[in-house]
């Protein structure tokens, strides 16, 4: 509803920084919010680590296309995120542009379970979590370092507020025992 008469093209509006700016402002105005929020999905971090994304359209946003990894050990050898390329770079550019025009900018950052869910079947992750907690500790450390780097880049891009969520790592999915761990 919010984007009907904007002329924005999808899925380009999810990938191009200039269109992200327009989309964020349209949504802000439509919702009568005091801030612009980016990105429009929970796939940016996983994609930046090599995930395969179906960008969707104005009705159904970006989501996992296919898993690119098959073993948890592969998560440990992923290269660091390149914040100067790809959609994650476009998100950061959009944040800077919005901030430079006086907007308050909220960046949604996705936690490790959700980011991994873009890369590998979550059943493999949960099985590893139960059977090899030391391996999962190393994986979490890697993701923690990447997320902290992302926060630093976001702050440098003028983001006012970081919103952190890990929907795939919620109690309703993990269960009480794994959540406690």
Image: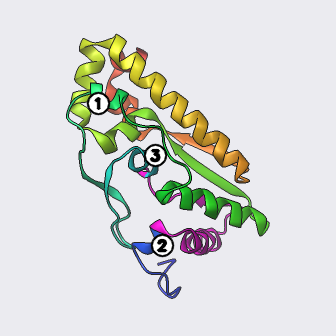
Which of the 4 image quarters holds residue 168?
A: top left
Q: Which mark is residue 74?
A: 1
- Residue drawn at (60%, 44%) of the image: 163
Of callouts 1 and 2, which one flags the residue occurring earlier in the amino acid sequence?
A: 2
Q: For the residue labelled by badge 2, is the local secondary structure a helix, a strand or a loop?
A: helix
Q: Is disc 1 surrounded by few (<14), some (14 to 19) or many (20+) residues within 10 Å?
A: few
Residue holding disc 3:
45
> Residue 76 in the image: x percent, y percent?
36, 27
> Residue 150 in the image: x percent, y percent?
58, 42
Q: Nearer the viewer, residue 40 or 158?
A: 158
Whether residues under marks 1 and 2 lie with C-beta atoms below 8 angstroms apart, the answer is: no
3D distance between C-alphas at marks 3 and 1 = 16 Å
- Which label lies toward us, 3 or 1? 1
Which of the 4 image quarters holds residue 133?
A: top left
Boundaries of the magenta span = 15-43
- Residue drawn at (22%, 22%) of the image: 127
Q: Is residue 18 magenta?
A: yes
Is residue 178 in sight in this rendering?
A: yes
- Residue drawn at (66%, 40%) of the image: 152
């Amino acid at each position: 509803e919010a984007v009907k008469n904007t002329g924005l093209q999808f899925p380009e509006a999810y990938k191009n920084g200039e269109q992200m700016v327009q989309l964020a402002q349209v949504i802000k105005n439509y919702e009568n919010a005091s801030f612009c929020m980016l990105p429009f999905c929970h796939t940016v971090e996983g994609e930046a680590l090599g995930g395969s994304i179906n960008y969707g359209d104005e009705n159904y946003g970006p989501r996992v296309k296919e898993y690119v990894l098959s073993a948890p050990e592969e998560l440990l050898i992923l290269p660091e995120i390149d914040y100067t390329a790809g959609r994650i770079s476009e998100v950061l550019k959009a944040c800077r542009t919005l901030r430079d025009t006086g907007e308050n900018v909220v960046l949604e950052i996705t936690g490790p379970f959700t980011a991994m869910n873009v890369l590998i079947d979550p059943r493999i992750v949960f099985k590893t979590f139960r059977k090899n907690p030391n391996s999962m500790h190393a994986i979490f450390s890697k993701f923690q370092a990447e997320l902290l780097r992302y926060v630093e880049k976001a702050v440098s891009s003028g983001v006012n507020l970081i919103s952190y969520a890990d929907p795939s790592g919620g109690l309703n999915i993990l269960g009480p025992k794994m959540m406690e761990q």
